[in-house]
Amino acid sequence: MKNTKYRKNFTDENKKPISKRNNSSEKVRYPKDNKEDKKYQDIPMLEGRNPVIEAIKSGRTIEKILIAKGSQEGSIRQLIAMAREKGLVIVEVDREKLDYMSETKSHQGVIAITSPYKYVEVQDILNYAKEKGEKPFVIILDEIYDPHNLGAIIRTAEATGAHGIIIPKRRAVGLTPTVAKASAGAIEYVKVAKVTNISQTINKLKENGLWIVGADMDGDKSYFESDFTDAIALVIGSEGEGISRLVKDRCDYLVNMPMKGKVSSLNASVAGAVLMYEVVRQRITKE
């Protein structure tokens, strides 16, 4: 496909141009085939209207926002107004370019080029709980590979007031555009620490007074028979393999989720949601 040059022709209801693009660097080459191998993998991006809106609200650093030509309806108009208020750069591009850039394949006509996600330290999560005057409530994810699972867990963690999530640097998914999209914007508000060694991190949490509770089908008791009102870290493993043996051995105890049907396990994000809301239920009831 021939190069395409984007010109200033995108206007709002007041006929104000959104951007000026007038140099040759704005030319874009689209691949003729094998798009999966030619994504913008090194560019930190947010895809979809809600994730971008939440990023704007949170004050996240955004280099520019790409909007598909002709998209001005509903939430896109709201997004543009918010971006203008923050002084952000908005650029109109062909939808084909967004299709090419998109990892999720569900960009809804908007992609924001952002700064990389900033991971925090485990101590930052503990300090956050202290600042709020609350007992620490932490989620530890052991070998979660599915970005949709991670995104859903982040969304529930934000909704339940968890103070942060801990993920491993290896053998797990990180904070990708797909994760951001699946989190529906919650990724902008949840502290995420990426650590080299989950087992050593668990030892540190124990030193700070947290109980480590693992979700496992072979747990000694069901989750609703357990006390989650103290400082706690919930460990959730992958859907296929569960919690690794080394991490499981570091847990103070394991809890199971009674299964009355024919399937033997729940999706990791669903199991995580059930446990997180049990923490909320118990803490509210105790107040």
Image: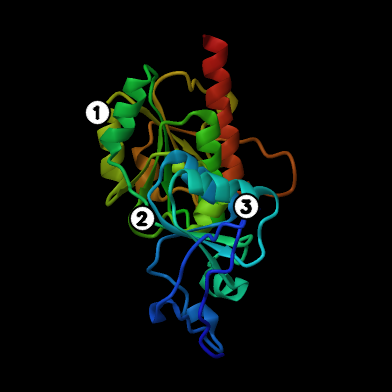
Q: Nearer the viewer, residue 35 or 232?
A: 35
Instruction: Name the front one of labels 3 and 2.
Output: 3
Local crowd size for mark 1, using a 10 Å CA cut-off: few (<14), some (14–19), many (≥20): few
Q: Residue sitting at 32 percent across and 21 percent down?
A: 130
Horizontal side, residue 225 vs residue 250: left or right: right
Residue 222 is at least partly visible in this image: no
Tell me how far mark 3 sits from mark 2, CA to CA: 30 Å
- The local crowd at label 3, few if under 14, some if 14 to 19, many if 20 or more residues have their Cα within 10 Å, is few
Residue drawn at 61 percent across, 46 percent down: 78
Who is closer to the viewer here, 161 or 1? 1
The numbered disc on residue 115 is 2
Residue for badge 3: 14
The image quadrant that residue 114 belongs to is bottom left
Q: Is residue 154 above or below residue 224?
A: below
Specify the quadrant of the image occupied by residue 59. top left
Q: Which residue appears farthest toward the right when viewing the image?
A: 261
